[in-house]
Amino acid sequence: MKKPELVVSCSSVSELKSMIAAGADAVIIGEEHYGLRLPGNVKLTEIQEAVSWAHSRNARVYVAVNNIFDNESLDDLTYYLTQVQQFGVDAVIFGDPAVLMASRSLPSPLKLHWNAEMTSTNYATANYWGKQGAARVVLARELNMDQVLAFKEHAELEVEVQVHGITNIYHSKRELVKNYMEHQGNDAASQDRSMQRGLFLIEHERRDQRYPVYEDRNGTHIMSSEDMCMLENLPELMDGNIDSLKIEGLLKSSDYNERVVRSYRAVIDAYAADPENYAFKQEWLDTITEVQDPERELSYGFFYKEQVY
């Protein structure tokens, strides 16, 4: 059985090294000027170091360039793509077609992964982007298992699926938290609105659910109240020949992410080695639940829900 790639987003070069040592086949890094919802801000000089180190360990580095670009960003975009290509990155993740257009001006082809967040919901659209130059599609997190497997069956490019961690449920380019604070009569400029601040939205009807919210240079981001965890159900995705399984490292400690990577690595290796006699070991999940935030439930996300668009 062909093993799927195990990929994780990282906050720094140091964490990148830890994740690869723990068993990740690939890592996602980037800086917030070009990428959205990244665990950390990894600059160009650091990306060069990261690629060199990862390649020496037969691991891959993907750079997130999935921001929503305005006119003023386009000149910098071409320069940035030129630099990461020279560093030897294995692929660039994009959602905005401006990235694809800019990549066509480069000296040689740049491998592209299309990630349009919640709009990558059908294989026909994915195949269209494949014909434009994308080598991989990152599926919407709202698809259920049947939809994911059908997607892969008809896709003409690689398919990546998130299997663990937090997910984005809302994004606005506006500074909504800043505006709210000022509406309350507070000095927003003196308040920390970053992801490290620990701000939450709580619904009046469901006060037990807390939705992390933060602001950065790209606007306001509202995240899920639960963490996806498909550890016990990886064989179903592996039987469906999914090419890449992603662990989202955002808003998690390096220790937590390392434990998650080790557990997913163990499941992938064990099932691939002997599918017929495979048995899930509870210790693989226990090592994650030991450090799981008690206020954030582990769930299957939308994998076993009926979703209507």
Image (spheres, rainbow, N blue to C red):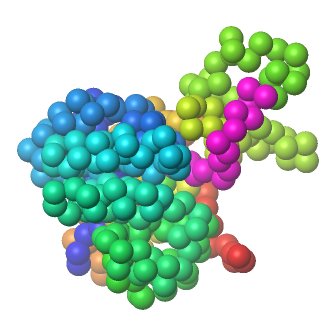
Residues 307 and 48: in front is: 48
The one of 277 and 132 positioned closer to us in this rendering: 132
Quarter of the image where one finds residue 128: bottom left
**Residue 299 drawn at (x, y percent):** 61, 57
Task: Identify which residue, 137 or 54, lies in the foreground.
Answer: 137
The magenta segment is 165-179
- With respect to residue 234, does 293 lie above or below? above
Kindly tell me whether residue 32 is visible in this rendering: yes
Q: Is residue 148 above or below residue 286?
A: below
Q: Position of residue 170 (x, y in %)?
A: 68, 50
Q: Which residue is depicted at the point 85% across and 43% down?
A: 203
Q: Is residue 169 magenta?
A: yes
Q: Position of residue 197 (x, y in %)?
A: 62, 23
Task: Say if residue 263 shows up in the picture.
Answer: no
- Residue 204 left/right relative to 87: right
Residue in view at x 16 percent, y 57 percent: 107
Q: For the point 74% across and 30% down, which residue is it?
A: 177
Which residue is at a point 49% across and 36% down the rendered structure image? 252
Classify the position of the N terminus by image quarter. bottom left
Quadrant where the C terminus lies?
bottom right
Q: Is residue 159 above or below residue 17?
A: below
- Identify the image quadrant of residue 184: top right
Asked if residue 82 is among those painted magenta in the image, a careful observer would answer: no
The residue nearer to you, when weighing 285 against 129, is 129
